[in-house]
């Protein structure tokens, strides 16, 4: 009378097809929840073109042999830190055409074997944590095109030695100092970036210009050299400080001279008083 847990069963989910190559195909089946009864040995899982709103960590992480996961064109709005906690063999992940809004720092941390990550066409995706890819040393292809990204901290991306292809087009990038490193990276290593409209969305005077074109310009604007007015300001400040120091020294000198005169005069008065005292007694 005991019913086996769906996560532990070895059958094939309803409305899905499973073959002897350990591929589970559930695309376009109008699913609203993640499929159950997945074979534990599944290596490829395709659940694209459905209406799935959540990836349940408990069920998904039983698939420890999974190397390919296509979740594109669903209704996913959030990926938690535990979603991919046990998928250490996963090499391909597609989260495109969903409703993601933010990627946290540990979201992809467990995916040590991840080679290709696609996160395109999430209209609400406006923030990716600076350390989101810090632990994905095997990552070679990253595509975040056609989202709502205005800025991207590239510190962890630059550290990925194997990264060879990056998709950034279709985002309203801000071409201001906050993205100086990103624009310069695109300018210097343009071969890594996929063809497309990787252009500035703001400010107004840079709209439509390619990130690669403004990289050097931003480096100049964000690290401007001193102008004539700056030098004049420093001269004036130096003169004021010098004058204040001179006046302070003069005032202190006058005070010291007056003090010495006062002490000397007081000493002379004391000597006179001492001489007059014996005569007054006599």
Image (tube, grey):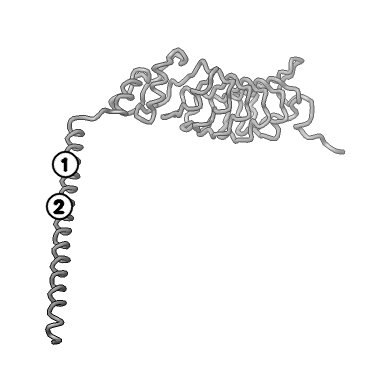
Query: Which residue has dot 1 on it?
Result: 239
- Quadrant location, the C terminus: bottom left
Query: Which residue has dot 2 on it?
Result: 250
Q: Residue at x 79, y 26 (%)?
A: 10
Q: Residue at x 17, y 35 (%)?
A: 232
Residue 250 or residue 177, whichever sits in front:
250
Q: CA distance from mark 2 to mark 1?
A: 16 Å
Q: Could you tell me residue 251's position as x and y percent?
A: 15, 55
- Label 1 sits on a secondary structure element that is helix
- Label 2 sits on a secondary structure element that is helix
Q: Could you tell me residue 127's position as x and y percent?
A: 47, 33
Is residue 279 positioned above or below 87 on the image? below
Q: Could you tell me residue 98's position as x and y percent?
A: 54, 28
Is residue 81 positioned above or below 137 on the image? below
Q: Could you tell me residue 156's position as x and y percent?
A: 51, 27
Q: Which mark is residue 205?
A: none
Apparent side of residue 242 relative to residue 206 in the rendered image (left or right): left
Is residue 266 positioned above or below 190 on the image? below
Between label 2 and label 1, give the one nearer the viewer. Answer: 2
Q: Residue furthest front?
A: 282
């Amino acid at each position: 009378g005991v019913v086996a847990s769906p996560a532990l069963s070895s059958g094939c989910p309803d409305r899905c097809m499973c073959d002897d190559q350990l591929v589970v195909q559930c695309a376009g089946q109008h699913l609203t929840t993640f499929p159950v009864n997945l074979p534990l040995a599944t290596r490829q899982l395709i659940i694209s073109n459905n209406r799935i709103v959540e990836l349940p960590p408990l069920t998904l992480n039983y698939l420890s042999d999974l190397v390919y996961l296509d979740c594109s064109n669903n209704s996913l709005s959030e990926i938690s830190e535990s979603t991919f906690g046990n998928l250490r063999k996963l090499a391909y992940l597609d989260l495109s055409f969903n409703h993601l809004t933010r990627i946290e720092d540990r979201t992809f941390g467990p995916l040590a074997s991840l080679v290709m990550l696609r996160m395109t066409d999430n209209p609400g995706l406006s923030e990716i944590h600076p350390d989101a890819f810090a632990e994905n040393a095997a990552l070679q292809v990253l595509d975040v095109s056609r989202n709502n990204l205005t800025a991207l901290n590239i510190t962890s991306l630059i550290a990925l030695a194997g990264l060879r292809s990056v998709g950034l087009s279709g985002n309203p990038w801000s071409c201001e100092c906050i993205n100086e490193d990103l624009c310069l990276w695109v300018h210097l290593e343009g071969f890594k970036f996929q063809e497309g409209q990787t252009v500035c969305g703001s400010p107004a005077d840079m709209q439509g210009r390619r990130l690669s074109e403004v990289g050097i310009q931003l480096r100049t604007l964000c690290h401007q050299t001193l102008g004539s007015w700056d030098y004049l300001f420093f001269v004036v400040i130096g003169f004021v400080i010098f004058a204040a120091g001179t006046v302070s020294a003069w005032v202190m000198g006058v005070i010291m001279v007056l003090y010495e005169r006062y002490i000397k005069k007081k000493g002379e008065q004391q000597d006179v008083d001492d001489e007059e005292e014996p005569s007054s007694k006599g």
